[in-house]
Image: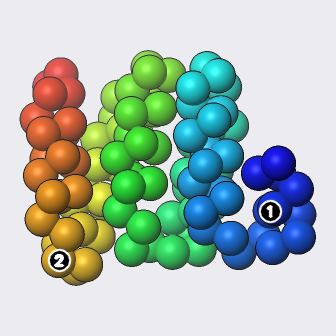
Amino acid sequence: MLKALLEEDPANKFARYGLAMEYAKAGQLDTAVSEFRALIAADPSYCAAYFHGGQALEKAGEVEEARTMYEQGIEAAERAGDAHTRSELQGALDLLPL
């Protein structure tokens, strides 16, 4: 259903986010990350995409890419004034191995 929504409206951020989350839940991490990145490219202020994209990258073993996504998300959250998401992103970043 989400794919159909995106076919009708490729700019539908809610559908893209939902699809990315479904891919992540299904363990299709590379596809999930691609969808999160597409969402971020379309709307760099969509802060939750950085958090969940980073989580998917971590699960895929891409720790440095996750670190970069979290850092970019922190910057986006600061620009958006989203203190809650900024805090979540910082927490995730702090838990990454050095």
Q: Residue at x 71, y 75 (%)?
A: 11
- Image-based side of 30 in relation to 50, left or right: right
Q: Nearer the viewer, residue 67 or 4?
A: 4
User: Circle 2 sits in a helix, a strand or a loop, which is it?
Assistant: loop
The residue drawn where x is 63% and y is 35% is 22
Expressed as whole percent of the image width and height from the top left, the position of residue 35 reads: 64, 50
Position of residue 28 relative to residue 16, above or below, is above
Q: Say above or below: 94 vs 48.
A: above
Closer to us: 97 or 48: 48
Q: Give the residue pinned by disc 2.
A: 81
Q: Residue at x 12, y 65 (%)?
A: 83
Bin the neighbour count of mark 1 within 10 Å (Cα to Cα): few under 14, some 14-19, many 20 and up: some
Quarter of the rendering containing residue 55: top left
Amino acid carrying mark 1 in the image:
Leu
Which amino acid, by three-letter code, is at mark 2?
Answer: Gly
Q: Let me know if residue 30 appears in the view.
A: no
Q: Residue 82 appears in which quarter of the rendering? A: bottom left
| Residue at 45% over, 43% down | 53
* Residue 60 x %, y %: 50, 22
Residue 1 image point, x, y percent: 82, 48
**Image coordinates for residue 10, horizontal then vertical, percent:** 78, 70
Mark drawn on residue 64: none
Circle 1 SS class: helix
Please state if 42 lies on the left or on the right of 7 as rendered: left
Position of 74 compared to 65: left or right?
Answer: left
Residue 63 visible in image: yes
Any mark on residue 6, and which?
A: 1
Q: Is residue 23 above or below residue 8?
A: above
